[in-house]
């Protein structure tokens, strides 16, 4: 399955807050933001520059967005991106939304990830 992928311009951070935390203002300061609340934690992926220094976070991520919207009946979308990256020993952090999927890779691995995905037939821009 060939996909169209677009690299988002922002550097992102994956942040961890205590369970039950409300969405802090800095998280939605602009650009990409994804929030997951569970009984164990609150996870936020947002623009790296917005994250305060006292927040537990892992910075240096870049997002590859799958062109959407994607039909819910489609199968193998994430696998068609994750498998070639796993084969190349490139770790990912995946996020799905109503319309599409995002695959985050470390900024240091972005060029290699794009090269690998193109070699698998995906269009990356």
Image (spheres, rainbow, N blue to C red):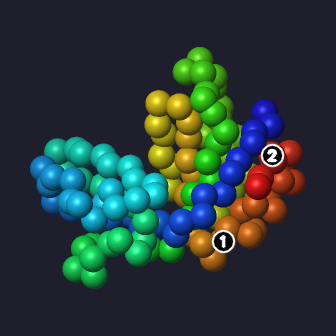
The reply to whether residue 79 is in sight is no
Q: Nearer the viewer, residue 119 or 68?
A: 68
Q: Residue furthest front?
A: 30
Residue drawn at the location 61% of the way across and 28% of the way down? 70
> The C terminus appears in which quarter of the rendering?
bottom right
Residue picked out by circle 2: 122
Residue picked out by circle 1: 109
Residue drawn at the location 47% of the way across and 66% of the way down? 12
Sequence-wise, the earlier of marks 1 and 2 is 1
Q: Nearer the viewer, residue 92 or 49?
A: 49
> Residue 2's x, y, as percent?
80, 37
Residue drawn at the location 48% of the way across and 46% of the way down? 95
> Residue 30's x, y, as percent?
40, 59
Q: Secondary structure at mark 1?
A: helix
Q: Residue furthest bottom?
A: 53
> Residue 73's x, y, as percent?
59, 17
Q: Nearer the viewer, residue 10 or 44?
A: 10
> Residue 46's x, y, as percent?
40, 61
Residue drawn at the location 81% of the way across and 47% of the way down? 123
Q: Quadrant of residue 43?
A: bottom left
37 sits to left or right of 89:
left
Label 1 – label 2 distance at C-alpha: 17 Å
- How many numbered circles does the render carry? 2
83 sits to left or right of 120:
left
Q: Nearer the viewer, residue 30 or 34?
A: 30
């Amino acid at each position: 399955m060939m996909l169209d992928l677009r690299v988002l311009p922002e550097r992102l951070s994956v942040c961890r807050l205590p369970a039950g935390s409300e969405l802090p203002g800095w998280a939605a300061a602009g650009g990409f933001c994804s929030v997951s609340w569970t009984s164990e934690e609150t996870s936020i992926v947002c623009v790296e520059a917005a994250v305060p220094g006292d927040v537990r976070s892992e910075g240096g991520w870049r997002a590859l967005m799958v062109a959407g919207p994607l039909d819910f009946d489609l199968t193998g979308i994430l696998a068609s991106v994750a498998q070639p990256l796993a084969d190349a020993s490139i770790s990912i952090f995946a996020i799905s939304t109503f319309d599409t999927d995002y695959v985050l890779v470390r900024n240091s691995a972005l060029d290699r990830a794009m090269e690998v995905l193109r070699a698998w037939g995906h269009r990356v821009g």
